[in-house]
Image (cartoon, rainbow, N blue to C red):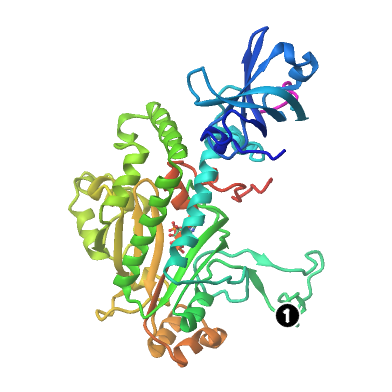
Amino acid sequence: MQRTKVKDLLQGAEVDQEVLLKGWVRTKRGNKFVNFIAVNDGSTINNLQVVAEAEKFSEETLKDVTTGAAIAVTGKLVASQGKGQAYEIQATNIEVLGKADPETYPLQKKAHSLEFLREIAHLRFRTNTFGAVFRVRNALSFAVHKFFNEKGFVYMHTPIITASDAEGAGEMFRVTTLDLDNLPRTEEGHINFEEDFFGRSTNLTVSGQMEGEVAAMAFSDIYTFGPTFRAENSNTTRHLAEFWMIEPEMAFYDLKMNADLAEEFIKYIIRYALENNREDLEFLAQRQAEEDKSKPQTERQEMTLIEKLESVVNNEFERITYTEAIDILLNSNHYKKKKFQYDVKWGIDLQSEHERYLVEKHFKKPVIVTDYPKDIKAFYMRMNDDGKTVAAMDILAPGIGEIVGGSQREERMDLLVERMKAVGINPEDMWWFLDTRRFGGCPHAGFGLGFERVVQFVTGMGNIRDVIPFPRTPQSAEF
Ligand code: ATP
Ligand code: MN
């Protein structure tokens, strides 16, 4: 007999028929005569209630039906007489496929803290919260591909191992097969990477952009979606050492078209989750509202999670230049009352407190900040005519801060080489990248969207460690 998933059964598939259900026991309650077993198989946040009359089953079987056990149930799917569910199964047979000793199974009925669940990341998928988070993550990732596919973008798999250390996006993890106890040395006493696997020094990628730019010079529109690594020792709620990034790169795009695409893209994937993961999002909204109750009034959300997402989808993002952002900050009461920890003046890299002031206090919606000072941005961003700023754009989101970093790229060879030299990159090392400017170069633009930060935004989860299945952070790579 074919197994039917909980999601389909709850929608009334095969009603009044014999069905086969397999899943994990969430709870069992009841009395001498009848047991109510809530079963979940991950297909939905909802459990399916299995009604097992005590007389039909051996005590032995029912004893092993405990929280966490894997079971197979056959029985008739009927409209439920009880409240809380439309359908239930009247069980005729229950097989315990895998026991879960109640004495040692870590997930019990009581609510567990997110911190505790991080320590049992291999089991946390079986909770309502993480079930919802990772179903939403899945939906968002599908929506990413759907969006770009509908627009005719080519999905490029850019390499994880890179030999260029010029990307400059952050600290890198070294990739080597050298014997660390016995390193080969050059005559000058440096480590001799010619003897390493690739015959040169290599690292894990911090961005697929360079390769993406190359591909865009043939396919016009491409995107990458893959793991990205940064050995930044920043223990924040929005940084991981391994995270997933989406990086579209478009030939013939300028900064405004780039910003338009990013805004349309973010709205599209959020709308997709709203339309396809309603129950999960409603659960997460409820969770956030509960969590808020224990917070001081000033830190509570003004809108529910769903209201926030709908407002993002239905309203235009604010667009300001960096210079305007600095003016807003300087004219704020917050600044006048000396409430910013870091100084504000033209030329600073916006700190998280500044970004949060702009999106959460001033505009109360996502903000696209453009045209940053050249000295705080990467060498490949296109120089503006003022000679002081570059065609950069960051998108800042309430509660998260930066979710997108992008720019129009410098397509003019002389200016690009000048900037490379200014930041200490040897243009010869980047010969293949520069070839895109040498041969058929054209105006182009792109951006990088941190996938986990979007998942955080959509699920309302405060810590980035709770939106990636197995987080990699300083001092932590257990699972
Ligand atoms: P931040 O200032 O927040 O560290 P960044 O300026 O280093 O970000 P970019 O190099 O522009 O970020 O990377 C593009 C996007 O990737 C960012 O907008 C962000 O969404 C995401 N991102 C960057 N670093 C991390 C990280 N360590 N963990 C998770 N996401 C990240
Ligand atoms: Mn960073």
- Is 338 situated left or right of 86 in this image? left
Q: Is residue 153 or residue 243 the one in the foreground?
A: 153
Q: Position of residue 32 (x, y in %)?
A: 68, 7
Q: What is the magenta range?
A: 101-106
Prevailing secondary structure class for the magenta stretch in the rendered image: loop
Q: Position of residue 184 (x, y in %)?
A: 79, 75
Q: Nearer the viewer, residue 351 or 198?
A: 198
Question: Which residue corresponds to mark 1?
Answer: 199
Quarter of the picture holding the N terminus: top right
Q: Is residue 432 above or below residue 283?
A: below
Q: Name the quadrant containing residue 26.
A: top right
Could you tell whether 373 is left or right of 151 in the image? left
**Can you see residue 210?**
yes
> Can residue 424 be seen in the rendering of this structure?
no
Q: Is residue 25 left or right of residue 309?
A: right
Location of residue 263 by image quarter = bottom left
Give the residue at x 78% y 70%.
183
Seen at 37% across and 71% down, the residue is 407
Exactly how many numbered labels are in the figure?
Answer: 1
Which amino acid does the dot numbered 1 rest on? Gly
Give neighbour class at mark 1: few <14, some 14-19, many 20+ (Cα, 10 Å): few
- When the figure is inspected, residue 89 is found, relative to residue 431, above or below; the finding is above
Residue 77 occupies quadrant? top right
Instruction: Specify the farthest residue to the front.
Output: 16
